[in-house]
Image (cartoon, rainbow, N blue to C red):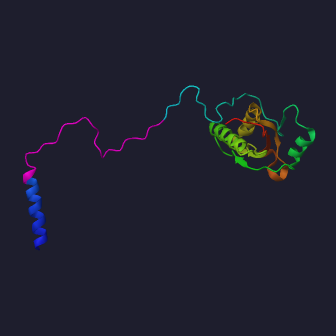
Amino acid sequence: MDSGDEKKDGDLNLFRQAMGGVRPLDHDRAEPWRRKPKPVPLERPGDERPGDELGDTAEEAPEFLEFRRPGIQNRLFRDLQRGVLEPEATLDLHGMRVEDARRALGRFLDQSLRSRRRCVRIIHGKGKGSGGQPIIKQRVNQWLPQRKEVLAFCSAPRWDGGTGAAYVLLSRKWSGV
């Protein structure tokens, strides 16, 4: 052992002797080494997440989706149907659960409106995996007209998803979010 190790042992022994009669102070504080959990905000009634405002009905969706608000020009709607208006963003709802799809759609529409997008595409699928009625397609057909910012929507052209996707025409005059 060299002299440095002996000095460290001597210092340690001196420290222990000096602290021999010491006892910890009593305090009501939390131990400093414990991690506190991050606060999680409570959801209050009236706090809505994107998509929560969309309600459900029991009606079945037609094979070709078609909706337009009064005042939408025929030519504009035909351009939407033919794919002349190119989608600026796409949301894929394939394989999602209904609640997840509802929230994703709400967030996507809000984001698209903030970005001032005119036309977007929503892929809802054809319902081959749901064994009968395409559930997400049915819900998208119900949810979109409930948003006043949605001016029109229709099934996409065959080369861009066909009856498994929808083109949505959004208002640029919308000032919410």
> What residue span does the magenta drawing correspond to?
17-40
Horizontal side of residue 144 vs 85, given as left or right:
left
Residue 164 on image: x %, y %: 77, 45
Horizontal side of residue 19 vs 90, given as left or right:
left
Chief secondary structure of the magenta portion: loop
What is the quadrant of residue 4 in the picture? bottom left
Give yes or no for residue 46 being in the magenta stretch: no
Task: Name the residue at 53% across, 27% down.
Answer: 44
Task: Name the residue at 82% across, 46% down.
Answer: 156
- The answer to whether residue 1 is visible is no
Which sits in the foreground, 133 or 56?
Answer: 56
Picture layout, residue 112 above or below residue 15: above
Which sits in the foreground, 36 or 15?
Answer: 15
- The answer to whether residue 114 is visible is yes
Picture layout, residue 160 above or below residue 63: below
Residue 15 on image: x %, y %: 11, 55
Residue at the bottom extreme, as displayed: 2
Residue 98 on image: x %, y %: 65, 37
Which sits in the foreground, 20 or 52?
Answer: 20
Picture layout, residue 143 above or below residue 10: above
Residue at the top extreme, as displayed: 45
What is the quadrant of residue 134 in the picture? top right
Image quadrant containing the C terminus: top right
Image quadrant containing the N terminus: bottom left
